[in-house]
Amino acid sequence: MNWLIKLPVFFILIFSSIFKLIYLEYFELSLVEKGLSNWFYSSITIHILIIIEFVLATSILLKSIHIKLISLSIILLSVIYSSDALLSNSSGMFSNYFVLPFYYKWIVLVISSILAFFSIWLIKSEDEKGPNKRIRSIIINLCLTLVISIPLFVLNPIFIDDFQKNETSVEKSNLDWSAIYQTCEEKNIILPPESEVFFAFFSTSCYYCNKGAVKLGVSKRGHSNSPTIVMVFPGNKKDTEAFIERNHCDFPYIRVSKDDFRSLAGNEFPAFFKVKDKKETNYYTGRTFNLRELDNLFQLN
């Protein structure tokens, strides 16, 4: 009976940690989109959760963590899983990224119930005592953490550059924004005269442009606090509309000639400008417009 209870919980936690590892980016996007985290903490949160699930799963077999601590941790995980299934759409946290069957939430609730039952059973169990056991447990848990952490951060690294505050300087201070403002006016896009406007220059075939557009769209759906955002494209209407649909970035947009696009954005895409009174106040490349700057733009910090 002991192993009949332990093994299902072990496999549930292992599967959950591996699933998050494979689709780690979707989890990060979902945390921000659901308003549960900002960009600065979303990646760190998912990495830590994967490590906790893996360590808990292995500790169940090795008995390397105090039983009461394992029990409380698994109860917390079961509450998180069941809350997501009950309070979200049928596909829960992945409602915008996967098409899952209608009975998904019931599967999650059954799994959460198994975890909760296991936790209650653990509370009633006896734990070994003694200083040697505690020291051995600490060493084992540290080793387990390193075993999962090293490949996790190798496969899905957290880049320091993403969290640095960029004191950007305007490299091109004499750009002519008259044509852009005029095109916005023709498209009935209202640009506040005394407020900053955020212009995002995207090429539809650029990998980093697509990634940047996804994050802008996720931020908008999760938080509405942002300046006016206008996307600028050099391509044809068909490619532009496909780009917007593919990346779920429903912002006002304009299309300009390739010459006008390059005269403002240069040859480095994506390019982002904060403009006020037709003068740039900040300029970002795809790299300098990082997670911290996204939080600043949408006031998530």
Image (tube, rainbow, N blue to C red):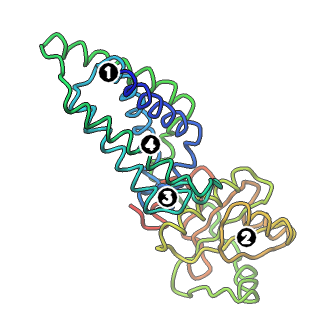
Q: Which residue is mark 2?
A: 232
Q: Nearer the viewer, residue 109 or 21?
A: 109
Label 3 amino acid? Glu
Q: First in sequence: mark 4 or mark 1?
A: 4
Secondary element type, mark 2: strand
The crowd level at tag 4 (other Cα within 10 Å; few <14, some 14-19, many 20+) is: some
Secondary element type, mark 1: helix
Q: Is residue 9 left or right of 249 when viewed as pictured?
A: left
Q: CA distance from mark 4 to mark 1?
A: 25 Å
The image quadrant of residue 272 is bottom right
Q: Nearer the viewer, residue 272 or 208?
A: 208
Q: CA distance from mark 3 to mark 4?
A: 38 Å
The crowd level at tag 3 (other Cα within 10 Å; few <14, some 14-19, many 20+) is: many
Question: Which numbered disc covers residue 141?
Answer: 1
Q: First in sequence: mark 3 or mark 4?
A: 4
Q: Which residue is mark 4?
A: 111
Percent x, y of residue 6: 37, 26
State yes or no: discs 4 and 2 in contact (Cβ < 8 Å): no
Q: Which residue is mark 3?
A: 293
Label 2 amino acid? Val
